[in-house]
Image (cartoon, grey):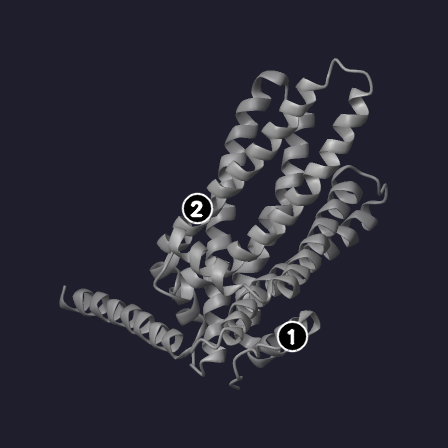
Amino acid sequence: MNREPANKSMGFFGMYKESFKVTFSRKKIFSQITLAILLPLTIILLSQIQVSYFIRNRNNAKSRGIVTAITEIIYAILNLIFTLLSTSSVVYLVACIYTSRDVTFKGVIGVFAKVWGKLIVTFLWCLLIVVIYTGVAVGLFLWFFVSVNDERQGGNKVLIFGICLFVPFFIGLIYMENVWSVAIVMSVLENVCGRKALGKSMKLIRGKIFASSAVFLTLHIASAGVIFAFSLLVVYGFLSSLVGKIFVGIACYLVLMVLIHFTLVIQTIVYFVCKSYHNEDVSNIAKHLDVGYANLGSQRDDIQMQRASV
């Protein structure tokens, strides 16, 4: 079942509606991606909270730091691998749906081998910008805190300044989330990555920034709510019943998995909506997908021929 590319007039509710239609248009492949990639990613994200809590309460002070560092490194590596794999797979599949390409589960998974380098470069650029942005905000707050610390009514001034600083800081984070999301999609579907992808993304999201911001914000609030509920009710034991913990834990895993799926689908839809808004042709995307898929196929054929000759 092929679909027309997302329309430029699509708003907040339209993007959610379109994400459901896209998902059900290729239910089989999306189900395979969910079970093979999104489920392990969800398990990694939530089990990290449980394991960290266990380490803090079951290890002595000397070994706690070493064990925590080792587990955090392992979780960070696994989280990065499955995040990039899920992103490339879902983005590529949605693009194939919009460009009327037939694709298999193996073909979708195989795209990761071609784009993982570009995704990491874009991810590192985004991480660097967020670290600098957050560092500047924290530095301004600490400077103001130190400068008025000895004054009377200093606490009130710090509170007012903190609120005034947090509002534009939060708006800036939402904007960067939009730029980041579209840049990640570009890194999969176009021959750009890193700083160039971020620059193109900033231009592309103009005109659709409010609708996309509202979509991403609601998804992140829902995800944060699931993580908070899991931490409070399951990990920290606000539920005393073992059966209750099991049911709540399973519900949190399933809901977070669904939220991750729709976040990845919608960020690709936002990309196509922005392309449509600026009247940009998506035929180049189709050509890029054809070339990339052909290269992956030829590489597999070469490997099979070499093995056969041996």
Between 291 and 169, the one lying in front of the other is 169
Instruction: Tell me if residue 284 comes above or below residue 231 in the rendering.
Output: below
Q: Check if mark 1's residue and mark 2's residue have beta carbons within 8 Å.
A: no
Image coords of residue 132 (percent x, y): 51, 37
Q: Is residue 248 visible?
A: yes
Q: CA distance from mark 1 to mark 2?
A: 31 Å
Quarter assignment of residue 255: bottom right
Amino acid under disc 1: Phe
Quarter assignment of residue 39: bottom right
Instruction: Tell me if residue 226 comes above or below residue 201 in the rendering.
Output: above
- 135 left or right of 241 in image: left
Image coords of residue 43 (percent x, y): 61, 50
Report the residue at 58% width, 81% height from top: 25
Question: Counting other residues with Cα less than 10 Å from the Cα at mark 1, is it few (<14), some (14-19), or many (20 or more)?
Answer: few
Secondary structure type for disc 1: helix
Residue sticking out furthest to the left = 309
Amino acid under disc 2: Trp
Secondary structure type for disc 2: helix
Image coords of residue 282 (percent x, y): 43, 77
Residue for badge 1: 20
For residue 125, the mark is: 2
Report the residue at 84% width, 43% height from top: 239
Report the residue at 45% width, 83% height from top: 100
Between disc 1 and disc 2, the foreground one is 2
Residue sticking out furthest to the top = 150
Q: Is residue 75 visible?
A: no
